[in-house]
Image: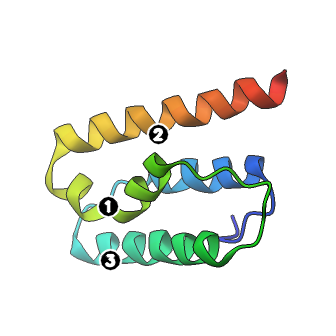
Amino acid sequence: MTTQPKNQSELALALRELAAERPADRHALTELEQRCVALARYLDGSVQSDLDVPEFVWHFLADPDIRFKDPRYAEAQLAGLEAVLSGWDRSSAA
């Protein structure tokens, strides 16, 4: 998936792909962090007025290292992200 989503569905897909990553070591964590930073930079510089980026998504993109260190935090944050994305799914289906 591209790190440059053009619409809400593509953003949801990109976030789900990042959420599915479970780095097993520091090298894999570094790669995930780079992907998260790249997406955050794109979203921060994007003039896409149709992209809804709630505060929770910014925290998710900033926290791969915390999720790596703390499985409980990871579980809670991933559940929260899924709740956000499910809300987007319901909104787009309406």
Label 3 sits on what residue type? Thr
Mark 1, secondary structure of its residue: helix
Figure check: 80 above or below 32: above
Query: Residue shown at 25%/53% (left/top)?
Result: 67
Inter-mark Cα distance, 3 to 2: 21 Å
User: 24 left or right of 34?
Assistant: left
Residue 20 position within the rendered picture, expressed as x and y whole percent measured from the top left: 46, 48
Q: Which residue is mark 3?
A: 30
Figure check: 22 above or below 44: above
Q: Which residue is mark 2?
A: 81
User: 61 left or right of 89?
Assistant: left
Asked if disc 1 and disc 2 are in contact, CB closer than 8 Å, the reply is no
Q: Point out which mark residue 15 bears.
A: none
Q: Nearer the viewer, mark 1 or mark 3?
A: 1
Mark 3, secondary structure of its residue: helix
Q: Residue furthest right?
A: 94
Q: Quadrant of the C terminus?
A: top right
Label 1 sits on what residue type? Pro
Q: Residue furthest left?
A: 69
Asked if disc 3 and disc 2 are in contact, CB closer than 8 Å, the reply is no
Inter-mark Cα distance, 1 to 2: 13 Å
Q: Point out which mark residue 64 bears.
A: 1
Mark 2, secondary structure of its residue: helix
Please tell me which of labels 1 and 2 falls first in the chain: 1
Residue 59 position within the rendered picture, expressed as x and y whole percent measured from the top left: 38, 55
Query: Residue shown at 30%/70% (left/top)?
Result: 29
Residue 34 position within the rendered picture, expressed as x and y whole percent measured from the top left: 43, 78
Please tell me which of labels 1 and 3 falls first in the chain: 3
Inter-mark Cα distance, 1 to 3: 9 Å
